């Protein structure tokens, strides 16, 4: 048996530890046209401008949304954790009504999320985030 190979393989394993990948749980088909409205409860917040909306507790019915009216810092940028925490405080478990919109590139779906403007009551979530002082800065 070649112990040198085992030692090198073990050392590489320590240098690149595996971490579980946490994908968001939203699994419902996404609306593919602008102007489609859907409603439900914010069931999950993935980052500062991404959330899942569903009428039931079943993730297979949750629609993954990228907020049309707020660009949070990307996960690797300063302020991203604060943006996510603010979105959780503002929207998690709240009833929302969302309407799909076209993004800057003209598409309704971006990175496996539907682009939508979501409202809690009469206020858009983007406006609520801005009023809470959350810094914008994403893409």
Image (tube, rainbow, N blue to C red):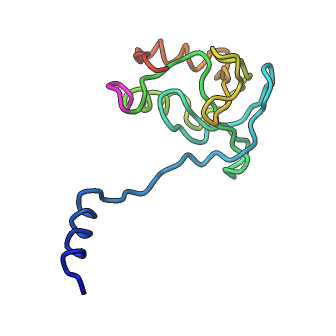
Picture layout, residue 108 above or below residue 57: above
Picture layout, residue 25 above or below residue 114: below
Picture layout, residue 14 above or below residue 106: below
Q: Quadrant of residue 100?
A: top right
Horizontal side of 111 relative to 34 (left or right) equals left
Horizontal side of 120 relative to 87 (left or right) equals right
Picture layout, residue 65 above or below residue 104: below
Name the one closer to the observer, 5 or 37.
5
Give the mark count. 0
Name the one closer to the observer, 23 or 132.
23
Horizontal side of 34 relative to 49 (left or right) equals right
Name the one closer to the observer, 95 or 110.
110
Q: Is 63 inside the magenta-drawn segment?
A: no
Which residue corresponds to the image point at 25% horizontal and 62% vertical from the top-left? 12
Name the one closer to the observer, 59 or 111.
111
Which residue corresponds to the image point at 70% horizontal and 41% vertical from the top-left? 54
Main SS of residues in magenta: loop
Name of the residue lying farthest toward the front: 2
Horizontal side of 31 relative to 128 (left or right) equals right
Which residue corresponds to the image point at 47% horizontal and 28% vertical from the top-left? 48
What x and y, as percent, mark residue 85? 42, 32
Which residue corresponds to the image point at 61% horizontal and 42% vertical from the top-left? 43
What x and y, as percent, mark residue 13? 28, 64
What x and y, as percent, mark residue 42? 62, 36
Q: Quadrant of residue 99?
A: top right
Q: Which residues are magenta?
A: 76-80
- The quarter of the picture where the N terminus appears is bottom left
Name of the residue lying farthest toward the bottom: 1
């Amino acid at each position: 048996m070649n112990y040198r190979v085992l030692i090198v393989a073990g050392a590489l394993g320590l240098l690149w530890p595996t971490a579980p990948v946490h994908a968001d749980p939203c699994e419902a088909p996404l609306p593919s046209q602008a102007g489609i409205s859907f409603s439900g409860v914010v069931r999950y917040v993935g980052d500062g401008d991404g959330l899942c909306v569903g009428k039931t507790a079943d993730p297979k019915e949750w629609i993954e949304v990228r907020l049309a009216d707020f660009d949070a810092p990307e996960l690797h940028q300063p302020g991203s954790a604060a943006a996510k925490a603010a979105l959780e405080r503002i929207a998690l478990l709240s009833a929302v009504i969302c309407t799909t919109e076209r993004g800057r590139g003209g598409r309704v779906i971006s990175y496996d999320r539907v682009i939508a403007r979501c409202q809690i009551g009469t206020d858009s979530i983007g406006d609520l985030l801005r009023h809470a002082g959350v810094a914008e800065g994403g893409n």
